[in-house]
Amino acid sequence: MENIDEKNSTTLLETNTSTEAGRAAVGRAMEGITLLNVNKRIYRIPTNTLPKDFVIKNQNELILKVADNKEIALLQRGFFSKGKGGKTLNSIQRETSTRIHCSRDVIEIRGTQKAIELAKSRIDEIVNASSNKIKATHFLSLPITDSHILRKVETFHSDVLSLSVPGIEPSILNNPSSLHITLGLLVLPRQEDVEGATRLLKELSSEIYDLVGTRTLLVQLAGLNTFDNPASASVLYSKVTEPEGQEVLEKLVEFLHERFSKSRYLKKENRPVKFHVTLINTKYRGREDATTTTTPNQGDRNKHSIPSRISFSAELFLNKFADINFGTCRIESLHINKMGERDPEGKYISAGKINLP
């Protein structure tokens, strides 16, 4: 493949790689930068770091074969830090006998296949540890939009308030307009991260369609539970189940976690996803209008003064509403929502979505 470095070339050019690699678009976005399009993902690579001849070895991530036993791996940088004075980076290079270069968005690893795999493993360990320390900014969700279910939740909230349980007040009741099933947490601190994640979601739409199948995705909201001791609860939620024989949610989560993790957008958690729809959450306590107010998050922290989280006893609700069934509904779309921020109607702000069958 020709190394594109001609002056006055401002358009994205396309060329063929070998049959082993398939096709990859190669172009020049700006002086000294080459764009590589692999598996619908654009990599911005300093032109002077690329060999004149290479093939794309792996279509799932960018692996360039440059010699019989030498390769170049190009990874999204994500939350990888080189360490003070490049100490971490230098340590990985020594341990793995690789040469590693970090630009703003991309990590370039040069070495043998075995050495590159070792370096990638070390980098993944560091990225995962860093991701765990950073708060999620967005989340993957399945909004509940069925009007019948929303009305039943409103009725349930009214019944809850009428019981006058200590610690229960309107501000901690989750707005029916914001009801959703969370599938995963994302860390997207920059606008380009948000754009990359939404682009990835749309690129995955055909595979998600195949996974869901031609049938409508249905879920049932029935029964109540808490995450902690019912006598001192912070959250009360409705259980979520699927019709017998459907079994799509687990597969969908596994698929999304694999793809978003590979792109370094997913916040790793040490617990399995519990499918639920939150009905009461004490983190909203004291806000002027929990149903429409933007949740304080980073820049909004001075908007309201939020008291410390006060729990409530959910035992009466679990007994009195043990057989509650909010109904079965169709899931119409899959969203990337911004953590904590809602529109005037109480719906979470969506950065991007795909429709489901």
Image (cartoon, helix red, strand yellow):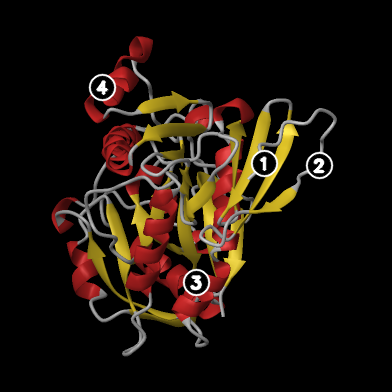
- Tell me residue 309's x, y (percent): 29, 39
| Residue that carries the numbered disc 2 in the rendered image | 11
| Residue that carries the numbered disc 1 in the rendered image | 2
The residue at 46%/79% (across/down) is 212
Q: CA distance from mark 2 to mark 1?
A: 16 Å
The residue at 23%/74% (across/down) is 320
Q: Is residue 224 left or right of residue 75?
A: left
- Using a 10 Å C-alpha cutoff, classify the residue at mark 3 as few (fewer than 14 neighbours), some (14 to 19) or many (20 or more): many
Identified by mark 2, the residue type is: Thr
- Tell me residue 12's x, y (percent): 76, 44
N-terminal of the two: label 3 or label 2?
A: 2
Q: Quadrant of residue 9?
A: top right
- Using a 10 Å C-alpha cutoff, classify the residue at mark 2 as few (fewer than 14 neighbours), some (14 to 19) or many (20 or more): few
Q: CA distance from mark 4 to mark 1?
A: 32 Å
Look at the picture and state if 157 lies above or below 322.
above
**Residue sitting nearer the eye, 188 or 298:** 188
- Tell me residue 180's x, y (percent): 45, 63
| Residue that carries the numbered disc 3 in the rendered image | 208
- Using a 10 Å C-alpha cutoff, classify the residue at mark 1 as few (fewer than 14 neighbours), some (14 to 19) or many (20 or more): few
Look at the picture and state if 205 lies above or below 325.
above
